[in-house]
Image (tube, grey):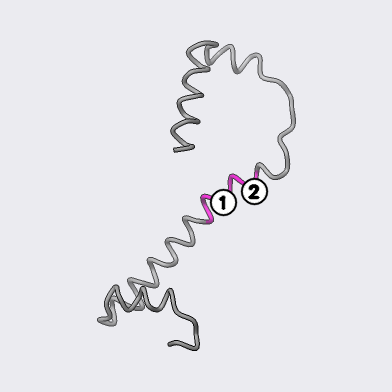
Amino acid sequence: MNFVFSIAFGVYLSKNIGVEEMMLSKGNREQPWWLAISLAVPYAKMVITLYRVTILQLYFLDQGKSHKEYWIYLTSNDEQR
């Protein structure tokens, strides 16, 4: 939902100010250090998701195990396995 609001706000600004005017009147404010890190978070989540899907496909499904067994593997402690 945040993404939709960000896009909508950008479109709103570009319609009222104009893209060219926005680019020409941009200030020289330096971005905070944490902004670069916050931009990397979605990519890190994507890498983690792809890793988990790879384990599901290669380790579980190719061995004939079920999605349920994979879920139990993800949600159980080492002592319970």
Q: Mark 2 and mark 1 in contact? Answer it, CB < 8 Å.
A: yes
Q: Is residue 29 above or below residue 77?
A: above
Q: Disc 1 designates what residue?
A: 41
- Residue stretch rendered in magenta on the structure: 36-44
Of helix, strand and loop, which one carries label 1?
helix
Looking at the image, is 36 positioned above or below residue 64? above
Q: Nearer the viewer, residue 65 or 51?
A: 65
Report the magenta stretch's main SS.
Answer: helix
Q: Position of residue 29 (x, y in %)?
A: 74, 27
Please tell me the numbered disc located at residue 37: 2
Q: From mark 2 to mark 1, how far is it between C-alphas?
A: 7 Å
**Callout 1, which amino acid?**
Val
Does residue 1 show up magenta in the picture? no
- Amino acid type for the residue under numbered disc 2: Ile
Q: Position of residue 12 (x, y in %)?
A: 48, 18
What residue do we see at 36% from left, 78% from top? 59
